[in-house]
Amino acid sequence: MTLQVEYQPPRAAEQLRYFMRYEQTNAQTEYLPHAHEWGQVIFVTRHVLEMNVEGRRLLTPASIPVWIPPRQQHASYNHQQAQFRTFNLAAALCNGLPQRACLLNVDAIVHAIMDEFARTGLEQPQSPEAWRLCDVLRDRLRIAPVQESYLPTLRDKFLAPVLHALEAHPGDNTTLAQWAARVFTTERTLARRCRQELHMSFSEWRQRLRFLHAVAQLGQGRTVQAIAHDLGYSSASALIVMFQQQAGTTPDRYRARMG
């Protein structure tokens, strides 16, 4: 059964320049649609975050935070237990940040600052040092490369059925040519639409899908061998190569880092 939760901001949130929140939610939890006057950067520290922002779906692994501009309605659904950290900043401080919800490919400095805030349980800056760290964090967020979505979706009449089928069965190894025959078009047409609509190749999209599923299954304690089998890989080593390409580390090290 899905547990529905309403977002509860801190007292007098509209008057704060910066504030942080640290939350843990159970599996099958839905944050109901809401919007607020401040900007919000959401870091999920384990598993995969799935959000709907102004009618757009955003999926991201734990290493890439989501930026929500002020006054944009958003909701989230957690298939598994998840831990969140949010960095919230007043609307007046959001200049230079994207005007549309997106993913931010932040650097190690951002993660280090958020880790320090979480370690000390800081909710609002009080000391000069904490204020400076918040300002540095805002500056690093401003220059972070933007990514529309880690796993984009679309309504293209040829591609949409293929992507929906793969989301339901990520271990399906059907080739692009075979998919093209099923949706009554050519492999060349599908490949072109992937580049134009998804801004990536078909193989890259499928690899990202499998990476998200691998992250979720690592959080469940499954072995790398079992995950590789479920996701259509011929061996655990093939999964490890894919994982390193996406996360820059091995599945076991990723699991250890995420706790």
Image (cartoon, grey):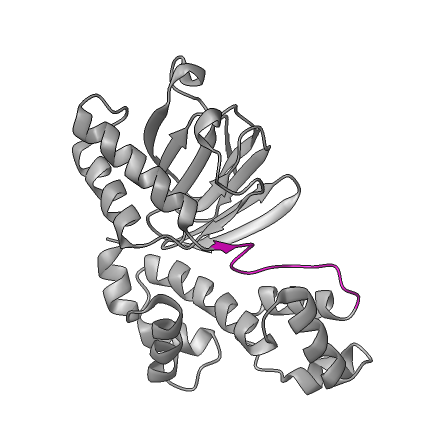
What percent of the width, then of the height, locates residue 203? Answer: 56, 78
In this rendering, would 200 be left or right of 108? Answer: right
Q: Residue at x 21, y 21 (%)?
A: 126
Q: Residue at x 73, y 84 (%)?
A: 188
Location of residue 26 by image quarter: top left
In this rendering, would 63 be left or right of 123? Answer: right
In this rendering, would 55 be left or right of 144? Answer: right
Residue 52, magenta (yes or no): no
Q: Which residue is drawn at 28% across and 24% down?
A: 124
What percent of the width, then of the height, locates residue 243? Answer: 37, 72
Residue 156, magenta (yes or no): yes
Location of residue 9 by image quarter: top left
What percent of the width, then of the height, locates residue 155? Answer: 74, 59
Whether residue 154 is situated above or below residue 23 in the rendered picture: below
Q: Which residue is drawn at 56% across and 54% down?
A: 148
Q: Give the range drawn in magenta.
A: 146-157
Q: Nearer the viewer, residue 44 or 126?
A: 126
Whether residue 175 is situated above or below residue 165 in the rendered picture: below
Whether residue 174 is situated above or below residue 94 in the rendered picture: below
Residue 82 seen by the camera = no
Whether residue 176 is situated above or below residue 139 in the rendered picture: below
Q: Is the magenta stretch mostly helix, strand or loop?
A: loop
What percent of the width, then of the height, locates residue 177? Answer: 69, 86
Q: Check the image and name the residue furthest to the right.
A: 184
The total of numbered circles placed on residues is: 0
